[in-house]
Amino acid sequence: MAANYFQEAFIMKSILLTCLLAALLVDVYASCDNILNSDTGSFQSPNYPNKYGPGECHYNINVTQGQVVQLNWKSFDIGQDKKNGKCPGDSVLVYDGTVQTYNGIFILCGQNKQSITSSAHTLTIVFKSKTHGMFSGFSATYTTANISCNGMALSTDSGFIASPNYPGPFPSGANCSYKIQLPANKVLALGWLSFNLRPSLPNRCQDYIEVYDKHLSESNKVFRYCQSGYNPPQFTSSGNVAYLRFVSSSLKNYRYTGFIAYYQSGTRKACNVDYLTPTGVVTVPNIASLKGKDLECKLSINAKYSDYLNLKWVEFGSDLFTNPTSCQNSIEIYDGHTSSHHLVSKKCNSNIGPKIQINGGNATIRYNIKNYQSNKNFRLMYERVINKVQHTIVFRNATCNATETYINTPLGRIITGSSFNCFKVTVNTLPQWAFILIIVVLCLVGLGIFLGISCCTYRYIKK
């Protein structure tokens, strides 16, 4: 009886301990699924500021409709930085919307304290950890700002911008402007996640977006876009300020949803810069260490799938070309990857002049500036042009021809046709001298074989 009593007691204690552990685990899991409904707030990684363990945590921020969420990180340390564009270890995924229905995602890792603005009233953060007791994690706060069609300003490191009423139909007669202003040492890249306006001809836009660099003025307009079926081109700014403008016609709209755009910031670390977006504004990077130095720098443009590039001078610093005749300070433009290509233009004066056109999508800008100061800068705007002309490439060798035709589009090259033909080399196709040479060679070979056989036969008989 005593043995049974102790067995039952042991079993009962085991059950109670198991239930307790399960309750603790459920409590830990529940604390990692956070719903934040206030218009301001904060959240942290598990066990912060101590080191976190493996797992997955969700932070769902829902603020008042008509507002956007502005997310800021007070501290952020979750291990390794990105390698080849991917997080090798732990990561934080920031969804513009919910995990189920979102417009775009920013993926953070390492020590990347990238502040983010949502396009609407919902932002979801997912923290995925594979490590145990190695890093302290993060502490974050969020605030809100009113959505405004006209004059809305964004100052976070990255963010999303939506047309009014997105994803519903945009209103008629809209005239919206959005200003992105970052810290002075930053530049920004602007891209597109969705673009759905009424179809119209490029030179007769009913609804359109416009992108401006530095100032909201006609001379600083980079492009206007209304082409249905493709997203607008990505854009790289010259500095820390850019504008996005959206205009809709007075016609009633029942089906077109407008756009979702995103932007990301970056910092230049050298005066040699590669521009990889289809449009942008080239300039001397805002780097404090460059001031007072003699600059000899190279800027490369690689706008893929271009039929040609349009380049336009925007402005020159007041002291850049103080002595034009000596060409002490100069800017050279080449039509290729390097300065060994053809020199298209050399600038030693402040005359804006006409647009410069370069075939293909590659250009190189070399500038030489003595004792550089901010008033010796310049801005050069470039834009990729796709004219949908069919291109033909022919590959040849001794016996075959391969032909491929394609057109450039914003999404890449589309192959429109290809052919592959080979031909046989026959005697009739050869010139007369070649025919005679072949006959002579064959006769000599035949004679050599005959003499060889005869010689061998003679020796055999003699033996």
Image: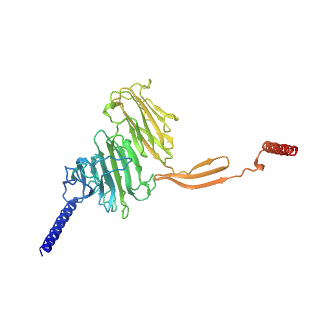
In this rendering, is residue 34 above or below 369?
A: below
Residue for point 88% across, 43% down: 462
Pinpoint residue 85: horizontal percent, then vertical percent: 37, 48
**Is 226 situated left or right of 179 in this image?**
right
Q: Is residue 228 above or below residue 22?
A: above
* 161 or 131, nearer to the observer: 131
User: Front-most of 282 and 163?
Assistant: 282
Position of 444 with respect to 46 (left or right) is right
Q: Quadrant of residue 216?
A: top left
Query: Hey, which residue is sitting farthest bottom in the picture?
Result: 1
Q: Which quadrant: the C terminus? A: top right
Quadrant of the frame with the N terminus? bottom left
Of residue 437 and residue 191, the one placed in the foreground of this image is 437
Point out residue 13 in the picture as x, y percentages from the top left corner. 15, 68
Position in image of residue 141 (x %, y %): 21, 51
Q: How does the figure colour the protein chain or chains?
A: rainbow
Measured from the top left, where is residue 370 in percent x and y? 38, 26
Q: Residue at 36% across / 35% down in the picture?
A: 270
Please indicate, yes or no, whether residue 107 appears anywhere in the rendered image.
Answer: yes
x 45%, y 45%: residue: 303
* Residue 314 relative to residue 11: left or right: right
Give the total of numbered labels: 0
Residue 213 is drawn in which quadrant?
Answer: top left
Asked whether the viewer can see residue 354, the reply is no
> Seen from this angle, which residue lies furthest top?
326
Q: Nearer the viewer, residue 272 or 206?
A: 272
